[in-house]
Image (spheres, rainbow, N blue to C red):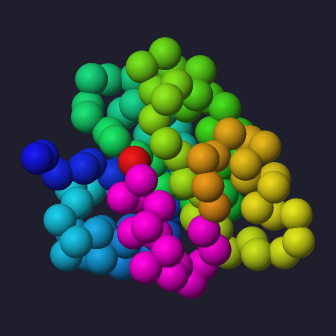
Amino acid sequence: MTKKRVLIIDDDARNIFALTATLKAKSFDCLSCSGAKEALDLLKTDEIVDAILIDMMMPEMDGYEAIPRIKNIEKRRNTPIISVTAQAMVGDREKCLQAGAMDYISKPVDVDKLLQLLLRV
């Protein structure tokens, strides 16, 4: 069985570092992009990506704008996208799902919950 490959999209290098270290320790391969535009460029290639973790609050293009754009890339239409956000108010989960995310996890990230989500991919 090959390792699942996760793309982490986050403008904060500390979040990328922490998620990458956590996921690699659990036998995932990780790629990262520091912004949505960079991620969209990567996702238009043939790069293997089994799941996407996307921060919802980024400058230039946030996750709410990026998720539908990702879904419009033919070969990425069915790639699972999980919103990772500091927004944990009533209605934020629904807003993420409405944007096209498969699921939602709030920061600070509950690693066990994140792993449960990724194992379903």
Look at the picture and state if 76 lies above or below 23. Answer: above
Counting from the top left corner in percent of width and height, residue 35 is at: 50, 50
Relative to residue 94, is residue 110 drawn left or right? left
Look at the picture and state if 22 lies above or below 58. Answer: below
* Residue at screen point 88% across, 63% down: 91
Which residue is at the front of the view, 96 or 38? 96
Which residue is at the front of the view, 108 or 119? 119
Relative to residue 113, is residue 105 drawn left or right? right
Q: The magenta stretch spans which residues? A: 105-120
Dividing the picture into quadrants, the one containing residue 49 is top left
Look at the picture and state if 110 lies above or below 121. Answer: below
Residue 8 visible in rendering:
no
Counting from the top left corner in percent of width and height, residue 92 is at: 81, 63
Relative to residue 73, is residue 19 drawn left or right? left
Residue 74 visible in rendering:
yes
Dividing the picture into quadrants, the one containing residue 50 is top left
Counting from the top left corner in percent of width and height, residue 85 is at: 64, 68
* Residue at screen point 36% across, 58% down: 119
Relative to residue 114, is residue 27 drawn left or right? left
* Residue at screen point 52% across, 25% down: 77
Magenta-drawn stretch contains 81: no
Residue ranking furthest to the left: 1
Residue ranking furthest to the right: 90
* Residue at screen point 26% across, 48% down: 5
Which residue is at the front of the view, 45 or 53? 53
